């Protein structure tokens, strides 16, 4: 991943070359490492999580899994609380973004304005 940031006079440019597939591969490697650290086979993790062995194997090898299955595996490995905290707080990079977040805290619907 290459991550560049340039900030001058309230200008912020970020170039993030890390793809969704890159992140999925990282998550699958981390899950496999946590499983092996606990000395669990795929079969044991399957019994604990309710996710089929073949699905666990596919995720570890090809980084393909549904969110529901990922959550079930994380819960089985004891990562429920860290997972719940993943997007618990807003992230902002500029004061403008912070102001937007504060102004929209209680919104129930979004808007169709996307800024590139």
Image (tube, rainbow, N blue to C red):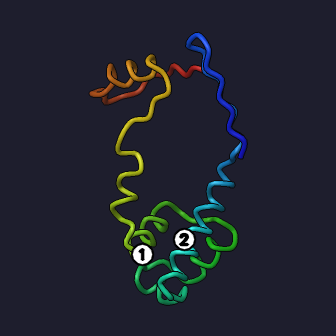
Residue 60's spot in the image, x, y percent? Answer: 63, 73
Q: Horizontal and vertical percent for residue 42?
A: 55, 85
The number of numbered discs placed on residues in the rendered structure image is: 2
- Using the image, tell me which numbered label, if any, was put on residue 31: 2
Q: Residues within 10 Å of mark 2 (few under 14, many from 20)?
A: some
Q: How far apart are labels 1 and 2 at the CA level?
A: 9 Å
- For the C terminus, the quadrant is top right
Q: Which residue is mark 1?
A: 77
Compared with 107, 17 (above or below) is below
Element on which disc 1 rests: loop
Give the residue furthest to the left.
106
Residue found at the very far top of the displayed protein: 9
19 on left or right of 40: right
Circle number at residue 91: none
Query: Is residue 112 placed above or below 26 in the rendered structure?
Result: above
Q: Residue at x 40, y 45 (%)?
A: 87
Looking at the picture, does residue 70 appear above or below residue 19? below
């Amino acid at each position: 991943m290459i991550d560049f940031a340039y900030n001058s006079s309230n200008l912020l440019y970020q170039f993030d070359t890390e793809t969704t597939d890159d992140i999925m591969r990282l998550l699958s490697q981390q899950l496999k490492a946590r499983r092996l650290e606990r000395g669990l086979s795929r079969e044991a993790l399957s019994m604990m999580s309710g996710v089929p062995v073949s699905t666990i194997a596919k995720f570890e090898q090809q980084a393909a899994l549904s969110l529901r299955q990922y959550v079930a595996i994380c819960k089985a490995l004891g990562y429920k609380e860290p997972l719940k905290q993943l997007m618990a707080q807003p992230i902002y990079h500029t004061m403008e973004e912070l102001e937007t977040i504060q102004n929209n805290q209680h919104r129930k619907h979004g808007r169709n304005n996307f800024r590139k």
